[in-house]
Amino acid sequence: MTDQKDGKYVRTPLSLAAGNAHTEMVQLLLNAEADIGAKDSDGRTPLTWAAIYGHIEVVQLLLNAKADIEAKDSEYGRTPLSWAAGNGHIEVVQLLLNAEADIETKDSEYGQTPLSWAAGSGHIEVVQLLLNAEADIEAKDIRHGRTPLSWAAANGQQEVVQLLLNNPGGVEASDEDYAAALQGACIGGYEAVIRLLLDKEAKFVWTEAEITKVCHETVICDGCNITPIRGLRYKCKVCSDYDLCEGCFQKKKEIHEEHNGFLELPVKDPEAMLRAWQWQDI
């Protein structure tokens, strides 16, 4: 009965206890020889669930019981370390590193390393911890070819970008890496990040063909509800989350008449933006 699975997510009592930080129950089930490696419908083990939510004591119990530290889920191919790093659980990351988890493991969806996940999510303390453990600062994902610097820049993670630009690992980013990071920052319109990269003499020149290929993932046009927006998008300077596709922008006075200032993204000329010291209304 200790390994009976529920009907919806195929999770065992140990999986549920681990994911909900019920430490005493986890210990009880381990003493009863519950299957420590049982996977649910997404291929996640009890250790994976504990790592996702940052349950330190549960993670330690499962590691002591020899849980598979490299178990990858079937949905994204991520290990417990990948999940803990991406979610910013620094103490769990430290536990997993102490247990010799693979610091360069890559998921099957994007091919990102734990450092890449932490950098893109803005978890600066985890990034520093992974760098101290000699994680590869130049590791590129398999889908976009982005380094941790590029992921941080594309998501507007200013502090992480600054940390990585400070070259803590003694590795100088290539001109290509700087250009990719600047490209990502321009797509998101992250002015502070753009400035940091321009200070490093990053260069990127947009062509009209490249702009048409830009995909603003997860962004919804508030005019026609299309998602994702492709090509140019226009972000309201006043509203925290209001975007228009190029077609709807032509009708902005009808659609969003209360505000006139929009940012055109991607930023086509970041150096001109730097000289202007402020965004211009369009």
Image: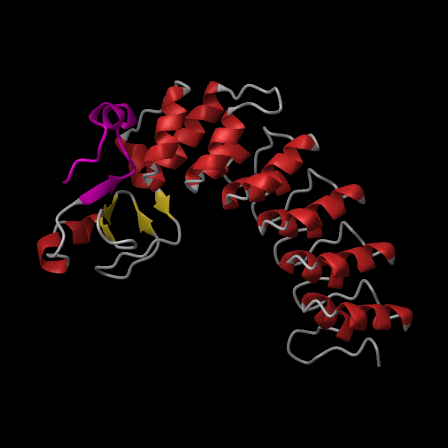
Horizontal and vertical percent position of residue 66: 86, 55
Image quadrant occupied by the N terminus: bottom right
Q: Position of residue 33 (x, y in %)?
A: 90, 70
| For residue 82, above or below residue 268 | below
Say above or below: 251 vs 150. below
Q: Is residue 116 visible?
A: no
**Residue 103: x and y, percent?**
70, 39
Residue 161 visible, this orientation? yes
> How many marks overall?
0
What residue is rendered at 45% in x and 25% in y?
A: 178
Q: Determine whether, in the image, residue 126 is placed left or right of residue 80.
A: left
Q: Which residue is drawn at 58% across and 52% down?
A: 87
The answer to whether residue 25 is magenta is: no
Residue 78's place in the image compared with 204, above or below, is: below
Say which quarter of the image contains residue 218.
bottom left
Determine whether 273 is above or below 260 in the image.
above
The residues colored magenta run 262-282
> Which picture quadrant has residue 106?
top right
Q: Which of 177 and 98 is in front in this view?
A: 98
